[in-house]
Image (cartoon, helix red, strand yellow):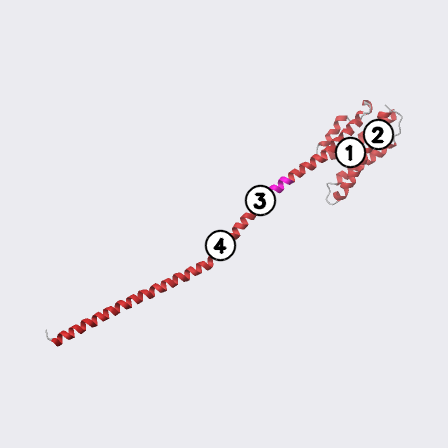
Amino acid sequence: MPDQTRGVFIRNIKTLHSEFCGAEEQAARLQENQFCETALEFKGSLTHSVQINPQGERMENLIYKIEEMAESLLELGIVGTALLVIIFFLILIISLIPTLFYLRSLHIAFQRCAPENRTHYPAEVWLLLIPFFNIAWHFITVKRLAESQKKEFEQRRLETNNISSSKIIGLAMCTFTLCTIIPFIGLLAAPIGFICWILYWIKLSGNSAMLIKKA
């Protein structure tokens, strides 16, 4: 092969080699650019998710706090209900003790009257323990006790003025007790009825004691 032809061939080979190397560099740079773009896109999406994530965490924390508050309120409601039940039974027991002594006084007052003068069996006073029924039965008990004691006092020739006054106070007590079930009016009637109940208890006990002294 002539030297001139050989030189041209070698130059072509070098040109092709340089072009091939340049193409490889361009491909490498293109891949690197694509990788950088992909990395930037991933970074952007990651940043966006990081920005959104705190809101999601705050929402989860809010839901968790609401659940905790609901559980606390539920526990508080259970405890509150238990306390109300306990308080109710304590009030019931405390109010029942003087009621039992009052009924015992009524029972004794009827017993101290002679059987022929009684308009009421002594044991019937315990029917006053029946709720709601006792409101009406109390009127009957007060009226019959006054009649029984009046007959007993007249038979023993004793003054009956105290009988009449105790009957009036007793009926007033029953009336104010009945008014306690009326809204608003009951707030005023309850304390007056309680005072009348104390006065009537004192009166009937005094009248009953007089029958012992004159027995």
Lateral position of residue 32 relative to residue 108, left or right: left
Say which quadrant the N terminus sits in.
Answer: bottom left
Label disc, if present, on residue 74 of the rendered structure: 3
Give the residue type at disc 1.
Phe
Distance of mark 4 from mark 2, alpha carbons? 80 Å
Q: Which residues are magenta?
A: 74-83
Mark nearer the viewer, 2 or 3: 3
Whether 147 is drawn above or below 73: the answer is above
Tags 3 and 1 in contact by the CB under 8 Å rule? Answer: no
Which residue has dot 1 on it?
A: 139
Which residue has dot 2 on it?
A: 207
Lateral position of residue 91 relative to residue 151, left or right: left
Label disc, if present, on residue 102 of the rendered structure: none
Q: Is residue 82 magenta?
A: yes
Using the image as rendered, state which of residue 84 and residue 153 is in the foreground. Answer: 84
* SS label for mark 2: helix
Mark nearer the viewer, 1 or 2: 2
Q: Mark 3 or mark 1: which comes first in sequence?
A: 3
Q: Mark 4 or mark 2: which comes first in sequence?
A: 4
Tags 1 and 2 in contact by the CB under 8 Å rule? Answer: no
Count of numbered marks: 4
* SS label for mark 4: helix
Q: Mark 4 or mark 1: which comes first in sequence?
A: 4
Mark nearer the viewer, 4 or 1: 4
